[in-house]
Image (cartoon, rainbow, N blue to C red):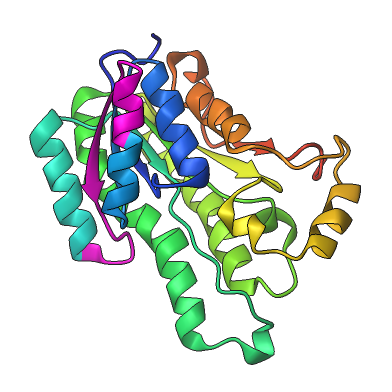
């Protein structure tokens, strides 16, 4: 139980990668605050984690709403007294070619994927600084590294997360707080399920391992970066992409 005694906050925890991260952290002994907009899915997740003897509590949070973020994290801190680990996972897509992309779709993706990470970090960093220990893991994407046609907003938000990760790593390193990113490639989630079968098959041809990844494989990387085993790693982007991006 490498994370016993730690309190972790996972955003976008109701499904996909966020859900798998919450389960992985709980299995390692962390008490996990699971946050998302969907109360029903959160309660189901909490029930599943509790059934295995681990601990999780649901907090409804809309990461695109600054006041909602502040109030939800305040509630987490009030209940547990601290937040040791922050996993910024919440994300959306609003795909369209730039020439047709509406400003509202640009703003929605940047607010949800990037600004929310800044807001969450700002709210939890005081707790980490006080105890001189913390782990921040931002979930970025291979498309934040190589770009993707029709996803200018998504790629920009994920590239921004990488810059935020490195800036934060420098800001808080002296207080024994690390900040890293995990960059998934093609992972089997509801987000990738919306892609056409033709696109998926074409994508798999470019993956050396010859398959898409699972949320659990991403969660394993997140769990490692959240642990003491990764104490000398900060400002790093850990690629979990089957070899899609090398170099």
Given residues 33 and 221, the one toward you in this image is 33
Name the residue located 52 percent from the left edge and 22 percent from the top edge. 224
Let me know if residue 200 is in the magenta part: no
Image location (x, y in percent) of residue 184:
64, 44
Above or below 145: residue 238: above
Name the residue located 29 percent from the left edge and 61 percent from the top edge. 62
Name the residue located 70 percent from the left edge and 75 percent from the top edge. 150
Given residues 12 and 48, the one toward you in this image is 48
Quarter of the image with the C terminus in it: top right
Residue 247 appearing in the image? no
Above or below 21: residue 4: above
In the image as oriented, which residue stretches furthest toward the top? 1
> Picture quarter containing residue 118?
bottom left
* Number of dots carrying numbers: 0
Image location (x, y in percent) of residue 192:
65, 56
Above or below 106: residue 57: above
Image location (x, y in percent) of residue 13:
39, 44
Image location (x, y in percent) of residue 167:
46, 47
In the image as oriented, which residue stretches furthest toward the left? 78
Lateral position of residue 160 relative to residue 98, left or right = left
Name the residue located 56 percent from the left edge and 26 percent from the top edge. 220
Q: Which residues are magenta?
A: 46-66
Residue 227 appearing in the image? yes
Lateral position of residue 213 relative to residue 13, left or right = right
Let me know if residue 52 is in the magenta part: yes
Given residues 232 and 22, the one toward you in this image is 22
> Picture quarter containing residue 99?
bottom right
Quarter of the image with the N terminus in it: top left
Above or below 47: residue 94: below
């Amino acid at each position: 139980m490498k994370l016993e005694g730690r309190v972790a906050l996972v955003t976008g925890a109701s499904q996909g990668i966020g859900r798998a991260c919450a389960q992985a952290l709980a299995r390692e002994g962390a008490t996990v605050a699971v946050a998302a907009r969907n109360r029903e899915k959160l309660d189901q997740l909490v029930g599943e984690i509790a059934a295995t003897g681990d601990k999780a509590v649901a907090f409804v949070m809309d990461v695109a709403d600054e006041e909602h973020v502040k109030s939800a994290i305040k509630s987490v801190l009030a209940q547990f007294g601290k937040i040791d680990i922050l996993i910024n996972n919440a994300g959306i897509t609003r795909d369209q070619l730039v020439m047709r992309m509406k400003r509202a779709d640009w703003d929605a993706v940047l607010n949800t994927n990037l600004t929310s990470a800044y807001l969450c970090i700002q709210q939890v960093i005081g707790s980490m600084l006080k105890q001189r220990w913390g782990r921040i893991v931002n979930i970025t994407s291979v498309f934040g590294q190589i770009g993707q046609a029709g996803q200018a907003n998504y790629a920009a938000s994920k590239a921004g997360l990488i810059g935020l990760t490195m800036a934060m790593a420098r800001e808080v390193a002296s207080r024994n707080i690390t900040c890293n990113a995990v960059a998934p490639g093609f992972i089997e989630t509801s987000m990738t399920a919306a892609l056409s079968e033709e696109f998926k098959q074409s994508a798999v041809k470019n993956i050396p391992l010859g398959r898409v990844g699972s949320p659990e494989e991403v969660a394993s990387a997140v769990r490692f970066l959240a642990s003491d085993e990764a104490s000398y790693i900060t400002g790093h982007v850990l690629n979990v992409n089957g070899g899609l991006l090398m170099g």
